[in-house]
Image (tube, rainbow, N blue to C red):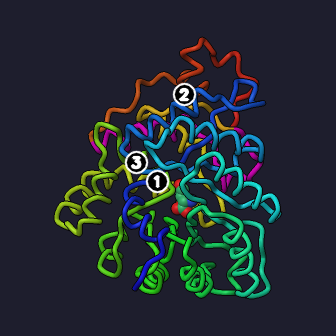
Amino acid sequence: MELSEAKQWARAYYRGIDNLLLPSHTPDFAGLDEAGIRHDVRQSIQHGFMSTSGVAPLCSFAEYVRMLEIACEEARGRIFVGAYIGEKDQDANRKLLAHAARAGCSHAVLVPRYLTPASSDELYQWYAELIESTSLPIVLYAQNNPRLKHLHPSGIALDVFDRLAELPSVIAVKLTQAINLVRAVECARRLGERILVGPVHLDMMPLLSQVCHVQWSGQWNAECAQSPQHPYVVEYIDAISRKDLDFAEKIYWMLEPAYRAFFQLQTPLLLKGGHPWQHIKYNQWCVGGNGGLIRDIGKPRDQVPVLTREARLSIRSAYQSVNIQPERDEEEEFVVGKTAYARGVRRSGMAALPLYE
Ligand SMILES: N[C@@H](CC=O)C(=O)O
């Protein structure tokens, strides 16, 4: 099969781990802490990740555009930067795609977060309009989307992805950590020859790699089970892509306790449409990331939980269980963010301590 230029580019270079770039904020939470964001981009490079993807739902539109610009400036071609496109309005999505391309992003992830389409055709149209409007390579997201359950009980409209995979700029599909195994195999079987299949759930990779070639995983908090000194997740996906299952299995059992702890925290939240954002920030900080509290975006606590002392201790012990010594227990540095702390900002100067107890 003749693959498009973008698909060939992806096969050659889109290999490895794509992590999450979360915003860092000023102490009054009114703006972005650019130094903190730059730190996290450099830290993703230290981890050996191939790409870092900006998390949009935690920022305003203007902040998100700026975050992508900062990330691309700091990346300077050393790591790919992905943009997440999922606004309510298609005009806003087109604008965001244009900003992302101008900033120097390598790809965009399209997520119809607000659309309840009457049919598969309407959903296809939503994607097609955006794909036609940009030259950026496109990543699809196979998530358990409650708004699509009338199209398929899994919430993953594979028939639509099947059509989209034919388009030259569609390069990959992310399989959510919470995906049903049968649906994951269907995605691998039906899409895997044309676009790259990127599972987040590490347990599924050995099996899926028997169905199609697996060479990337993203966008997720891969820092939950590795550090720059112990890049287990990076080594695991590398072994999977080389089809060296003996080595992959060996690495898997080295990272498994920490991965399982994160899986057990995150998966029930994903199924409700949430994410443990503050926990992810803490995870990243424990292995050298900037940290700094993210804003409370007003989601119910059973979707975006509070980071408690107990949760912090269990994250620290998850790292210890895989032989990683987490960052010194300096909670104040985590709360304000590493770069702000170095500039003299302290907890007493923060306007609030959202999602933190
Ligand atoms: N959104 C991701 C997880 C991010 O940490 C997923 O669907 O698995």
Q: Which mark is residue 222?
A: none
Which residue: 53% across, 35% down?
A: 74
Q: Position of residue 337 (x, y in %)?
A: 57, 26
Q: Which residue is mark 2?
A: 334
Mark 2 nearby-residue class (10 Å; few <14, some 14–19, many ≥20): many
Q: Which residue is mark 1?
A: 18
Q: Establish if 318 lies above or below 34.
A: below
| Dot placed on the residue nearer the N-terminal end, 2 or 3 | 3
Closer-to-camera residue (40/281)? 40
Task: Give the alpha-carbon distance from disc 1 to disc 3, as whole Å.
Answer: 6 Å
Q: Position of residue 122 (x, y in %)?
A: 76, 83
Q: Which residue is mark 3?
A: 49
Local SS, label 3: loop
Q: Nearer the viewer, mark 2 or mark 1?
A: 1
Question: Looking at the image, can residue 30 be seen?
Answer: yes
| Dot placed on the residue nearer the N-terminal end, 1 or 3 | 1
Amino acid at the residue labelled 2: Phe
Closer-to-camera residue (23/271)? 23
Closer-to-camera residue (6/190)? 6
Q: Are marks 1 and 3 in contact (CB under 8 Å)?
A: yes
Amino acid at the residue labelled 1: Asp
Query: What are the residue bounds of the magenta stretch?
Result: 295-322
Total marks in image: 3
